[in-house]
Image (spheres, grey):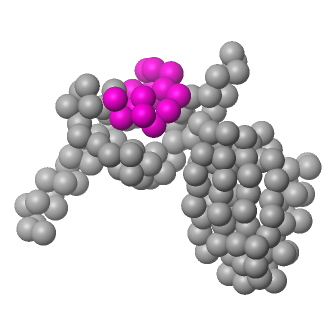
């Protein structure tokens, strides 16, 4: 890829991400599809993968509003406040965890997997190599089978606190 193309792509990405932040701050957006449609209406060509990547990079989470509806929100508070927020997201979204060798399969409330995965990632467990989230399931790759077994009680302790 030519140097100019890279610069152009970076500029497009920054503009798109600024627009995403603006949209989320000014509208109640419930789904990636809805966000994609809004971006398309404003001249941005996006795929679902691009939206997912932007949401992850911008640390956007799904939160429950006062009416009980889920919507995307920008997370930009202090680290202390973030820790409490992530713990709350983990507690509210978590349903169960199952160990499959060095993989933890975490079931969540529908629509909460990305938020719960972001919360788990933010807690920076040294045992976790990475995670992938769908709609209601997270696959967490743990460094070893032994450490996966040791991680379950740590997560349970956070949820039960």
Where residue 102 sits, quadrant-wise, is: bottom right
Observer able to see residue 134 = yes
User: Picture coordinates of residue 107 (x, y %)?
Assistant: 74, 52
Observer able to see residue 82 = no
In this rendering, position of residue 104 left or right of residue 34: right
Look at the picture and state if 37 lies above or below 136: above
Where residue 145 sits, quadrant-wise, is: bottom right
Instruction: Give the residue displayed 56% in from the left and 28% down from the top.
Output: 71
Where residue 17 sits, quadrant-wise, is: top left
User: Picture coordinates of residue 59 (x, y %)?
Assistant: 51, 47
Look at the picture and state if 4 lies above or below 107: below
User: Picture coordinates of residue 19 (x, y %)?
Assistant: 32, 33
* Observer-nearest of 123 and 129: 129
Q: Is-magenta flag for residue 33?
A: yes
Among all residues in the image, which is located at the extreme top? Answer: 67
In this rendering, position of residue 147 left or right of residue 52: right
Counting the numbered discs, the total is: 0
Q: Which residues are magenta?
A: 23-37
Instruction: Give the residue displayed 12% in from the left and 69% down from the top.
Output: 1
User: Picture coordinates of residue 85 (x, y %)?
Assistant: 70, 42
* Observer-nearest of 161 and 129: 129
* Observer-nearest of 145 and 3: 145
Q: Main structural element of the magenta stretch: helix, strand or loop?
A: helix
Instruction: Give the residue displayed 29% in from the left and 43% down from the top.
Output: 46
């Amino acid at each position: 890829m030519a140097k100019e193309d890279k610069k152009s792509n970076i500029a497009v990405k920054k503009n798109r991400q600024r627009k995403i932040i603006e949209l989320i701050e000014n509208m109640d957006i419930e789904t990636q599809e809805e966000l994609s449609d809004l971006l398309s209406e404003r001249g941005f060509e996006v795929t679902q993968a691009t939206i997912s990547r932007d949401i992850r990079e911008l640390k956007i989470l799904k939160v429950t509003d006062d009416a009980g509806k889920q919507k995307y929100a920008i997370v930009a508070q202090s680290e202390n406040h973030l820790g409490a927020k992530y713990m709350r997201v983990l507690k509210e979204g978590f349903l169960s965890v199952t160990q499959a060798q060095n993989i933890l399969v975490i079931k969540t409330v529908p629509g909460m997997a990305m938020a719960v995965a972001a919360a788990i990632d933010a807690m920076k467990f040294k045992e976790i190599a990475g995670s992938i989230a769908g709609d209601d399931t997270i696959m967490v790759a743990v460094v070893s089978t032994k450490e996966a077994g040791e991680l379950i009680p740590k997560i349970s302790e956070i949820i039960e606190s």
